[in-house]
Amino acid sequence: MVAAALVGEDRSVADTIWDRLEECVQDLSEPFRAAEMVGWFRRNYPDVKEQSLRAHIQVATSNASAESRSMFVNRRPLITRIEHGLYRRFDGDPGPTQPNQIATHDRRVMTQHALGVDIEATVDRYFHDRDPSARYTSFDYCFNHFQQHRTEVAAWGEPTGMEVSCLQLGFYLASWGMLRGSSGLLRRSARHLVPLIETLADAPAEVWDLDLDGYDRDGIDLVLRTALDVRRALRPVEASDTLVTKVMLGVFGCVPAFDTYFMKGFGVSTFSRRSLRRVGEFYRANASIIDQQRQPTLDFTTGQPTTRLYTRAKVVDMIFFIEGGYPQR
């Protein structure tokens, strides 16, 4: 039935529906039902036929059979079925999770772990032996470049333009583990990042200035929309949430990088609206001390501190990167 619904469907059309389904599942609150996805499409993309949508829901489900996932079997799933007609966003674990277990876990983590972290001590551990040539200072140089040259990063033939932007972003991603053997980027040159740089340059001004103090509904919507744009710009590389959020952190500084260590430390399993709301809540509960930990970036030429501060999102990223168990560098 699923295969029949997709037979004859142009691949570009299928990719478009997939992109819209990805947007849909990021927008809905977990857990969500198939009927909610159908309703979301009726409101936002009424031209998509329900039969085709339901076929895409099936092939986007991580714990559906390989046969039923059809031509999308090698693509990273979007959702996981946790009971009949009920779904959550795919987080790398294809197994079922009961929604009441998810909610209980979130509440426990926020009260017993996240809000009890020693922020100052953890940030001190992160900055231990900080040095201009150390691995993680690649963030500083990448962030400085994009923030300083916002209107020029995609210009061809300019000293601060496209080529330098690709190299800065590429080296930062390599330093942060995004070019390991399992990464699709490992098989690409820096020029693969050109569409991404163009997308970043066209991002709305609001995302360049967004930080955790702006994590209201509109701010979180902006983060999720930008993440979708970044993911699309990286194709045909299938970008993970970790890669997407590391790009956004290194360029805009507007969201923590949702890698293994951060998610373990913060007690979340997905990059989602719910997780972003919790990030905003954590910041608001600890705003004063987090703001005090905003260290200046280091300058590439001099190795000395600049006047540009780490964003609040970067501070929270550092805290839970360490809390998640990353070893001392």
Image (spheres, helix red, strand yellow):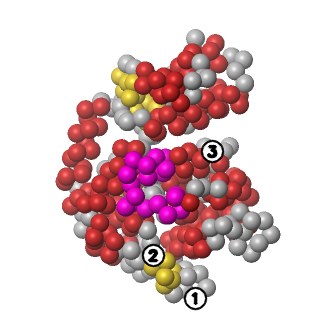
Label 2 sits on a secondary structure element that is strand
| Residues at marks 2 and 1, CA–CA distance in whole angstroms | 16 Å
Please report whichever mark, 3 or 1, sits nearer to the chain's N-terminal start.
Answer: 3
**Farthest residue in the left direction?**
112
Label 1 sits on a secondary structure element that is loop
Left or right side of 307 for 157: right
| Within-10-Å neighbours for mark 3: few <14, some 14–19, many 20+ | some
Camera sees residue 313: yes
Q: Vertical placement of 151 versus 82: above or below?
A: below
Give the residue at x 44% y 72%: 310
Give the residue at x 46% y 46%: 221
Q: Quadrant of residue 8?
A: top right
Please report whichever mark, 2 or 3, sits nearer to the chain's N-terminal start.
Answer: 3
Q: Residue 9 colored magenta?
A: no
Give the labeled residue for mark 1.
302
Query: What is the three-letter code of the residue carrying label 3?
Result: Arg
Q: Position of residue 161 (x, y in %)?
A: 72, 69
Q: Position of residue 201 (x, y in %)?
A: 65, 59
Q: Position of residue 57 (x, y in %)?
A: 52, 24
Q: Vertical placement of 305 versus 165: above or below?
A: below
| Within-10-Å neighbours for mark 1: few <14, some 14–19, many 20+ | few
Work out whether residue 17 or residue 102 is closer to the camera in this orientation and state it: 17
Give the labeled residue for mark 2.
309
Q: Point out which mark residue 232 bears.
A: 3
Residue range of the region highlighted in magenta in the rendering: 206-224
Camera sees residue 66: no
Which quarter of the image is occupied by the N terminus? Answer: top right
| Residues at marks 3 and 1, CA–CA distance in whole angstroms | 36 Å
Work out whether residue 247 or residue 287 is closer to the camera in this orientation and state it: 287
Query: What is the three-letter code of the residue carrying label 1?
Result: Thr
Q: Residue 214 colored magenta?
A: yes
Left or right side of 224 for 288: left
